[in-house]
Amino acid sequence: MAQKMTAAVFADAGETEHATLYRQAGETLGSRGVAVVVTAVAGRYPVQFVAGALGKGARVTLICAKADRPDGLPDSVAVELAEDARDAARLAAETADALIGLPGGLSTTAALYRAWADVGGPVSGKPVGLLNRKKAFEIVRGFISDVANPGLGSTDRLIVFADGVDDLIGRLKRLV
């Protein structure tokens, strides 16, 4: 039986050019038995990702500030409340075995980084997986190899990059 894993997924909320990719990513995680945690900001969450995950039977938890609770959430989505958006992201990271970044805007990538740092970064032992579709995270890969690796040593057990969701999940499951 496949190892169960919970992933905090960071993706753009609301309308996004990545809607199709997000739905496919949600479906893949759901198919692989991964429970997912997402956050809402200003009442918006990654709708397509959540729909894909729920469609494949994933357990989905949304964490948000009380004022940011989205309307029209599917009944099967568990909701947990936080103090604010940063606290929601921290709680998502704390709850998860691993963090996943999907291609999106800079604010989404910044939220992932802050959440990981807030739970201890490398000391937390929580790996970060970045879906590098169409080289979305190449600048991050460069930063890690030029700046982080010299200071931390090898980051291969901390941060993984993959072009496909299935490959990304496989790599993360080996690390958790």
Image (spheres, helix red, strand yellow):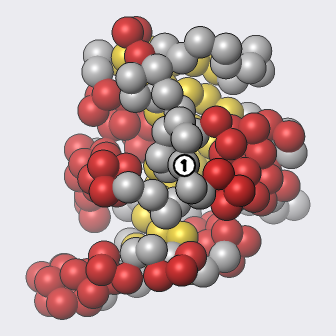
Find residue 141 and report its horizontal and vertical position in percent: 34, 82
98 vs 157: above or below = above
Find residue 22 and report its horizontal and vertical position in percent: 65, 54
- Examine the rendering and report whether any part of residue 38 can be seen: no
Q: Nearer the viewer, residue 138 or 146?
A: 138
Query: Quarter of the image containing the C terminus?
Result: bottom right
41 vs 73: above or below = below
| Circle 1 crowding by C-alpha within 10 Å: few under 14, some 14–19, many from 20 | some
Q: Residue at x 59, y 57 (%)?
A: 18
Amino acid type, callout 1: Thr
Q: Nearer the viewer, residue 142 or 121?
A: 142
122 vs 77: above or below = below
Q: Nearer the viewer, residue 122 or 167?
A: 167
Q: Is residue 71 left or right of residue 148?
A: right
Quadrant of the rendered structure where residue 128 is?
A: bottom left
Q: Nearer the viewer, residue 102 or 171?
A: 102
Q: Residue at x 37, y 50 (%)?
A: 108
Query: Quarter of the image containing the N terminus?
Result: bottom right
Q: Which residue is mark 1?
A: 16
Q: Is residue 168 left or right of residue 149?
A: right
Q: Is residue 132 left or right of residue 146?
A: right
Find residue 124 and report its horizontal and vertical position in percent: 32, 55
Q: Describe the element under mark 1 as helix, strand or loop.
A: loop
- Examine the rendering and report whether any part of residue 43 can be seen: yes
Q: Residue at x 27, y 87 (%)?
A: 142
How many marks can you see? Answer: 1
Q: Residue at x 64, y 36 (%)?
A: 47
Find residue 103 and report its horizontal and vertical position in percent: 49, 63
